[in-house]
Image (cartoon, rainbow, N blue to C red):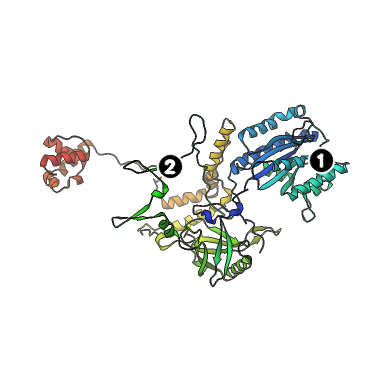
Amino acid sequence: MADFGYARYGEDDEDQDDDEFDPQFRFGSRDGLIFLVDCTKDMFDCDEDDEESHFQVCIRCVQTCMQNKIIGSDKDFMGVVFFGTEKSENPTDFKHIYIYQNLDQPGAPRILELEELQEKGYKKFGAKYGHSDAFSLSEALWTCASMFSNCAQKINYKRVMLFTNNDDPHAGNAQYQRQAKTKASDLHETGIDLELMHMQKPGERFDVSKFYKDLLYTDDDELTELPDPAERLEELLTRVRSKDHKKRALRRVPFSLGNGLDFSVGVYNLVRSCPKPSAVKLSRDTNEELKSHAKTYLEDTGEVLMPQDLKKAQTYGNRRICFENDEVTEIRRFGPSGLALMGFKPRSSIKKHHHVKPASFIYPDESTYAGSMTVFTALLRKCLDRDVVPICKYIPGKNNPPKFVALMPQEEEVDEHKVQTIPPGFHVIFLPFADDFRKVPAEDCPRATTEQIDKAKDVIKKLQFKFSSESFDNPVLQNHWRNIEALALDRDAPDELVDYTKPNDEKMRKRAGQTIEDFKDLVFPEDYVPGAKRKATPSESAAAKAAKLATAMVDLDIKKEAQAGRLGKLTVAVLKEFIKKEKIPSSGTKKADLIDAISAHYGVE
């Protein structure tokens, strides 16, 4: 079985149990990225056909990455270092190395600073910072490593992204070349990844084999050439307004096949609803973040109650039954957490519309039980061969209720380059209990004719398209982030939002306009206008209403109705007319007031 591409991909959900949470990724989940930008004179040269220099493109990439990171993962750290400048500023006093932005969380002031540099500041860059070819790339990498090591926060994944258009910066200087290769090797050993964002000069090819191949690749690497720089830059310049979910297992649980045969699996969430970030309460005067404290008071005396003073109760048969906290905890437990095999069912017996909650995904976990991969692979292979689905009892955590789940097997798929596109494993489909089903009352509805059904089929055929949820961003979230960004960066208006969830009426009319009109002619009456409001029926004249009221009161004995308690069934108009006729005093014009006045008139309580 090949390596699982999403092997730490998951996210907390509502039934998360702290005791069952995988501690492997509880801490150190903060990432760090340093942009190392070449500032030699060649980076500022601009062709007649080019509107931007390579340096401007680099700064725009850095700015876009920071804007994406603020939304995706604002806890991560980012920094910007220039090399090849005449001016120097770094803790080690290396020449021609300038730390433009220290390693810290991205924020609006940093983005505005980069925006100013990219749009106007680059013109004065030479006068303010200068240019020099006497830099040492080894010292630039040393500065980046020192920034990571001196960071007060623990950083899990460290990267240095190097922007340059010079494929041989130390040509003719063997000592500088050797030092750079040694330092790059040191970065690799300390867990710092070095990525090259190479930019090609007009009419020239960036030859990675001259210098950078030894910095980026080890002897075991199979890669021999870099990706197309245009694609990499386009990827960096693309705005992505979405949360960056940390890749981790939701939990790791045992899987019991019976008779003492157990192995371990990791549970992952591949899909979950992404909400807007919750609002933070601030002080009106100082804008400082507020903390909320809740206290429970005794209603009669106002005494503050502590958690140990509280009990939980359930009313049963007009009797309140109280439980101690440890009793409530014991009631909630149905056994140890894990999956227990109940049996197998044909895949066709699983109803897709029995959707209780989003499915999870399981993959073997060798860290808990050695040999889990072998047992898991054998189970998956047999289920695929026989087209069956294991039915299991699943207890996610020790304080969670049991659930029945169906494990839908999924075979591994790879592309033409033998790269995994779909991982092997089981999708955990949560099944409903008998109590979860609802019965819909059957109604006698009109039936469509054969001609109407055939025309509806034609409409469906013409309006078919390839749908993938991954192609559509949530417009609510996109609008939220655009407005927040506009306020933070002091924009006049947020970036334009294109809502792709709205139907393309023009394209639909082009593809199926006449067919839709034919379907409407078959189904709707001639005078029907879709979307138009129904016309209200004309109101009756005053004379007609008076005649109708007089007819209603001809054989009506109000006294008998009051004694029988049926005044509530009469209309307000009838009650008002009787009070007016009998000159009965009333305290109001509402129906309840009229009924009380008539009841008091006849002495009915």
Circle 2: element type: loop
| Distance (Cα) linking label 1 and label 2 | 69 Å
| Quadrant in the rendering for residue 149 | top right
Amino acid under disc 1: Gly
- For label 2, the residue is 294
Q: Give the x, y percent position of residue 490.
A: 58, 30
Which quadrant is home to the N terminus?
A: bottom right
Q: Left or right: 200 with respect to 70?
A: right
In the displayed structure, 172 sits above or below 434; it is above
Q: Give the x, y percent position of residue 99.
A: 72, 35
Q: Left or right: 592 with respect to 527?
A: left
Residue 448 visible in the shown view: no
Which quadrant is home to the C terminus?
A: top left
- Looking at this view, name the residue that lies furthest to the bottom: 259
- For label 1, the residue is 203
Residue 332 or 244: which is nearer the viewer? 332
In the displayed structure, 54 sits above or below 211; it is above
Residue 438 or 8: which is nearer the viewer? 8
In the displayed structure, 2 sits above or below 484; it is below
Crowd tier of the residue under label 2, counting other residues whose Cα lies within 10 Å: few below 14, some 14–19, many 20 or above: few
Residue 16 or 533: which is nearer the viewer? 16
Quick check: marks 1 and 2 in contact, CB under 8 Å?
no
Residue at the image point whose x is 41% and y is 46% from the top: 306
Crowd tier of the residue under label 1, counting other residues whose Cα lies within 10 Å: few below 14, some 14–19, many 20 or above: few
